[in-house]
Amino acid sequence: MWEVLGLSELFPVMTVLLLVMTTVFLGLWVRDVRHYGRQRMLSARIQTFTVPAKRTLDDLDQPFYERVVVPWLTRQSRRWSQILAPQTVRQDLARRLRQAGFSWSPEQYLLLRWGTTLAMVLLGILLDTAGMGHSALMDILWPLGLGTIAYLYWGVHVSTRAQIRLAQLEEALPEVFDILGMSVEAGLAFDGALHKLVNYLPVGVAREEFGRVLSDIQLGMTRSEALTALAERTRSRELKRFAGMVVQAERTGGGMVATLRAQSREIKQARAALARERAALLPVKMLFPMVAFIFPAIFIVILGPAVIEIVHVFG
């Protein structure tokens, strides 16, 4: 076809020109992609140090929910929480909410708990009105039972979530102390080791808690104070022991590497002892399902023919 059109001599030149243009455009594209990635990384870094400007609004410019409903609910929750719960109870509740990972205040939690309980009591009354209660006892049990279930649910939910978060945190502690120990041994300061740890850990409880420790240290708290606050916030025995070892190391001038190694070794030994203890309990736990399910089947297979024969003989 090229010979018919008279372009057979230009075909190699056009091919080389096309390859050169493709190479040039590919290089420009790679340069632009790298430049865009660098600009995006710089923008993300700058964004962390940028304080968003808050636009002042008139009261009437805000939605009705934020202008009227939210302040009224806040005032009522504070008022009723002071009536229903003393100061010590609210402080303990705030600690439990932090331990469970909730951002609610004690007043918001109490308002939600009592509001849900009241709603379930009203639902029980509606069920009684609809004819679900066939006796006077059922008329009382429906509202009382639903309200009790709703009230107990929130307490169990907070406690269960706190235990789950604590188990997830303690599961990640051996890796945490190994990373901290290697980072400090490599020459990093404790703050730098914490920063490396937070960047390395996956999204979860450990990253959240140690990220808060790093923020506390950057805001002016000492290492011992930040770790002590972490131990009190999570109620972890390993972290409490580690905070005590850090305080002792700072007072006596001991090395942080030895402290981290000792803590990691103690946690691994405790995990191994716990695993051996659970393995020793397995035969006892397996005894109950064997007696309840396996032994009856074995008895049927072994004694079944004999029982049938005895019935035929003495029938």
Image (spheres, helix red, strand yellow):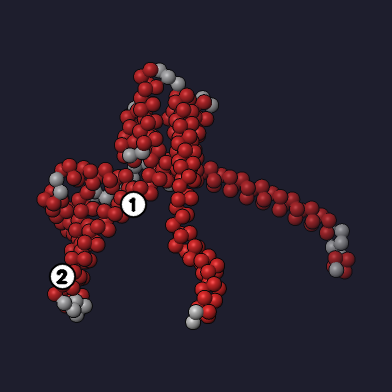
- Spatial distance from mark 2 to mark 1, Cα to Cα? 30 Å
Task: Tell me the kind of residue under disc 1.
Answer: Thr
Q: Secondary structure at mark 2?
A: helix
Q: Estimate how packed mark 1 is, as few (under 14), some (14 to 19) or many (20 or more) residues with alpha carbons within 10 Å.
A: few
At x 45% / y 38%, what residue is drawn? 173
Task: Tell me the kind of residue under disc 2.
Answer: Ile
At x 29% / y 54%, what residue is drawn? 156
Instruction: Point out which mark residue 140 bears.
Output: 2
Measured from the top left, where is residue 254 in percent x and y? 42, 19
Measured from the top left, where is residue 109 in percent x and y? 23, 53
Instruction: For the residues labelled 2 and 1, say whether their Cβ atoms are less than 8 Å apart.
Output: no
Observer able to see residue 1: yes
At x 18% / y 66%, what residue is drawn? 144
At x 42% / y 41%, what residue is drawn? 170
Q: Nearer the viewer, residue 223 or 5?
A: 223
Q: Residue furthest top?
A: 252
Q: Looking at the rendering, in which quadrant would you find the N terminus?
A: bottom right
N-terminal label among 2 and 1 = 2
Instruction: Point out which mark residue 176 bears.
Output: none
Measured from the top left, where is residue 126 in percent x and y? 18, 74
The residue carrying mark 1 is 160
Q: Residue furthest right?
A: 3
Q: Quadrant of residue 86?
A: top left
